[in-house]
């Protein structure tokens, strides 16, 4: 396979406004395409934003009418999959001649449940995969349901085998192993975590999986929140809820781009499959370094 350019988009949403955020995503896809990127990754739930600092009127054993109104507002700014927004993303992916992967809040119209989902669009203009986060973390469970794990799949593409997990799913060793067993080569890790410990996780995954890792986060300040929502933030909410930290890492843990903090930006780097082969000389998690005589692994693919 020939080397190609890949980009991660560190950006802010138009918070709680899916229409404006969709429009911004289109502009950023076009910008990345001008850099000849053939793979473009956006952060976790860029639509309608990661609601850090909002409690949705909840406490253990209690909910408020105002909190339910906030949930309704968030739900109304989530997207259907498939739907008109996904059709637009597919069109833009085709125009860009690139694989485009976007983190969204998805609303399931059969149940009204929301999911934290990762959508994959092909250069042919098709939605080729949807992955629903299998375990929302802590208070995220107020908002999102659990995916059933049947979509922990890797896409075999002309660019290589592309797959990924969302945010703290990447702390789940068995979820990572599901991707490794499918031979993932380009590992996508959209997130809402901007801490130093997250960078250590991404580097570990690159070295463990002997794969390229694309980490992508939002850049979000308190000023990105609508005025009425600023008043509902927890009292100790920071002025910079998410400083970024997007990064591209080689299969041996070398930083190829980033991490970048404190601004919206697009990071781009070359992906060369020869680096994957060279990295596996001394370690291959599912090959010569595996011990199937010692360990068994089972992925229950069916819901």
Image (cartoon, helix red, strand yellow):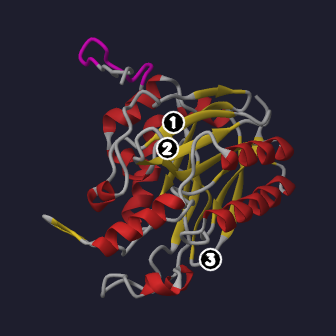
What residue is disc 2 on? 206
Work out how far the residue at label 1 is from the one at label 3, CA to CA, in angstroms: 29 Å
Provide the residue span drawn in magenta: 286-296
Give the x, y percent position of residue 103.
55, 51
* Mark 1 → mark 2, Cα distance in angstroms: 5 Å
Front-most of 143 and 28? Answer: 143
Residue assigned mark 3: 263
Q: Is residue 94 left or right of residue 62?
A: right
Is disc 1 in contact with disc 2, using a CB cutoff of under 8 Å?
A: yes
Q: Do we see residue 56 in this rendering?
A: no
Front-lying residue, 228 or 119: 228
Q: CA distance from mark 2 to mark 3?
A: 25 Å
Instruction: Residue 288: say if magenta.
Output: yes
Q: Quadrant of the N terminus?
A: top right
Please tell me which of labels 2 and 3 falls first in the chain: 2
Residue placed under numbered mark 1 in the picture: 210
Assess disc 1: are there few (<14), some (14-19) or many (≥20) residues with their C-alpha within 10 Å of its C-alpha: many
Question: Which numbered disc flags the more N-terminal residue, 1 or 3?
Answer: 1
Give the secondary structure at mark 3.
loop
Q: Is residue 273 left or right of residue 64?
A: right
Q: Viewer-proximal residue, 179 or 98?
A: 98
Foreground of the two, 251 or 266:
266
Mark 1 or 3: in front is 3
- Secondary structure type for disc 1: loop
Picture quadrant of residue 150: top left
Q: Where, quadrant-wise, is the C terminus in this rendering?
A: top left
Q: Residue furthest left?
A: 61
Percent x, y of residue 228:
47, 85
The residue positioned 61% from the left and 63% from the top of the image is 18
Provide residue 128's location: percent of width, then percent of height.
64, 31
Taking the image as shown, residue 39 lies to the left or right of residue 147, namely right
């Amino acid at each position: 396979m020939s080397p190609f350019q890949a980009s991660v988009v560190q950006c802010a949403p138009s918070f709680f406004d899916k229409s404006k955020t969709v429009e911004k995503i289109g502009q950023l896809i076009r910008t990345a395409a001008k850099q000849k990127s053939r793979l473009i990754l956006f952060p976790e739930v860029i639509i309608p934003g990661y609601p850090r600092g909002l409690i949705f009127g909840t406490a253990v054993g209690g909910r408020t009418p105002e909190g339910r109104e906030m949930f309704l507002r968030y739900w109304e700014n989530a997207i259907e999959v498939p739907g008109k927004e996904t059709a637009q993303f597919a069109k833009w992916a085709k125009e860009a001649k690139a694989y485009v992967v976007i983190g969204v809040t998805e609303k399931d119209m059969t149940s009204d449940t929301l999911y934290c989902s990762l959508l994959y669009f092909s250069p042919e203009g098709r939605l080729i995969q949807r992955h629903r986060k299998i375990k929302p973390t802590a208070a995220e469970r107020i908002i999102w349901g659990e995916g059933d794990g049947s979509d922990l799949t890797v896409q075999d593409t002309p660019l290589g085998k592309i797959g990924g997990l969302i945010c703290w799913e990447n702390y789940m060793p068995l979820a990572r192993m599901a991707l490794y067993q499918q031979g993932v080569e380009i590992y996508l890790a959209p997130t809402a975590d901007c801490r130093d410990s997250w960078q250590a996780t991404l580097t570990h995954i690159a070295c463990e999986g002997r794969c390229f890792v694309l980490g992508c986060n939002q850049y979000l300040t308190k000023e990105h929140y609508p005025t009425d929502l600023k008043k509902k933030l927890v009292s100790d909410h920071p002025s910079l809820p998410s400083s970024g930290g997007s990064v591209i890492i080689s299969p041996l843990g070398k930083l190829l781009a980033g991490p970048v903090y404190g601004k919206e930006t697009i990071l781009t780097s070359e992906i060369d499959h020869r680096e994957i082969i060279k990295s596996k000389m001394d370690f291959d998690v599912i090959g010569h370094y595996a011990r199937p005589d010692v360990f068994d692994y089972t992925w229950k693919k069916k819901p």
